[in-house]
Image (cartoon, rainbow, N blue to C red):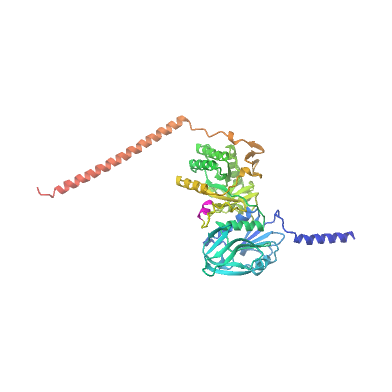
Amino acid sequence: MKRYLLLICLSILSILSIHIPVQADDNRPVLLVYDSENVYYNGSKKIDSVQRMLTADGLKVKTVMLENYRSGELSDNKYRGVVTLINWQEADLSNDSFTHDRAKFSGTKLHIGPNLQDDELEGLHSKKGMIIRQQLTLSDNGITEQIPYTNRMEYLVDVAGSDKYGVLNTQNVGNQKTLPYGVKVDNNAFLPFWNTSGLAVNCEEKLIADLFNAKTDSRPLLVINNVTPTSNLEYLDKLVDDLYRNNVPFAVSATNVEGNTNQFAYKKYMYSLRMIELKNGIVFMRVPYLYSYTGKEINAQNLKATMSERLQLMVRSGVYPTGLSTPNHWNQDAVLGKVGLKSASNVLLLPDPKTYPKVEQTDYSQEFDKAYYVMSLKDLDKAKTTVSLTKANNLNYTLPTALNIKMPRTLSELRKVEKSVSNSELSWENPAAEDNSREMNFAKMKLEYHAGTYFVNGNEQNISDTAPVQKKHKHKEYQETGLNLILSYQGKFLTVFILVTLIGFVLLIYKGRKVYWDKFKRK
């Protein structure tokens, strides 16, 4: 009798477990299936953007091309959700195995682009319509943006009772349509297209957060990108001072090197990074540029040694990185991701460059405590909106988002960057005011940043006591100054000599011409 009661209880529990909704801490990955890279129209940029946004939502992601999908891959016990990205509308590519498995899948589903199937429409409790050759505007939070011309777009009809994210309006005079941009019905969702910048990003973030891991509104992090030892440190210092005076918290993505670290220029670079830490800024160590490995094999051992050495050099110089800055393709690579990124709890996910070397590409990406979706602050300024997106302080970002400004190379670029930040009315994220810690663990070193304080292996670091860079020796300065004076006078002498010679030639030509013509004059 007890056995029968036990079996009945187990049966009831198994039935109930089927209907228990997936919790936020579900560590099953999401399957991203795309039909084509569509390289000709830069479609890889969209794939990169979707991957980064899913990672920013704290998700593990497996990415598969539609033609490479194998029957039975998508199942409830393996994945918590599936994202279908139609990246090349005209090709009308399909895979019957994927369509069949997706119809049976009971997890979360998101379809981006056209080619909605009947089972997806059924889950969305809707029908689909089509608009052709239209100019659209996207509106959300009282802001309207004109988006690129649409050749053909599917949309949902009769979606009452759904959650909507943004509104699309056609501009046909006398036949204007008002359509939802993002739509969510229970655990099914749809986006007619995917934009990688502008107002659409806010709608996409809200939809993905509501669909998978719900997040509260967060402020964007301001990031100075492309900071290297060869950057104009004078401009960097001026920009940092300007941000500090205006009480703007910020971060920098800083590249480090292993060679020539005993040079004055390197010490000056480290000093500039220390000043950033003292002026309410934090440092993300940028992963190595792989093109610098010319002639050197990129493998786990070499990469681990390089990353460890660069990190230790920074720590010895009084610079304590709080995370890593990386192009997204590192997180899609078995060697680069597992060896290079696993040490950081926080990462800045930069867009991929157009070309990059692949070491051991994998379908799976990692998850992080906090991964930032990085966009350009300049792109926000250029968006064709009724209210500038940099002045829309009511337009919060749902997922961790970083707005990137490039390290200025000229004085005019510096002025433009300072102006764009000062004109912005955004409320910036302040890492020093956070309760959560940011950690870096590499080899036997543990770096931690918490509430504005730095720790190394549990020991608090007082960065204000870090010794400044020693000035150059006076005798050396005198020698260098004397040499510069000699070169300067030599250059001036050559300039004067050349000018005198040219004037002499002109006079000789004039005199010779006069003598020549005098021969033909009658005397």
Q: Seen in the image, is 266 located left or right of residue 455?
A: left
Residue 165, compared with residue 320, is above or below; it is below
Numbered label tally: 0
Q: Mostly what secondary structure, the magenta segment?
A: helix
The verdict on residue 380 being magenta is yes
Say if residue 196 shows up in the picture.
no
Identify which residue is drawn at 38% across, 36% down: 487
Farthest residue, direction top: 475
Q: Is 388 or 199 nearer to us in this picture?
A: 388
Q: What stretch is highlighted in magenta?
A: 377-382
Residue 349 image position (x, y, % from top left):
59, 51
- The residue closer to the viewer here, 219 or 107, is 219
Residue 279, how many percent across, how many down?
A: 56, 40
Q: Nearer the viewer, residue 259 or 96?
A: 96
Q: Can residue 14 be seen in this view?
A: yes
Instruction: Where is residue 330? Give x, y as percent.
Output: 59, 52
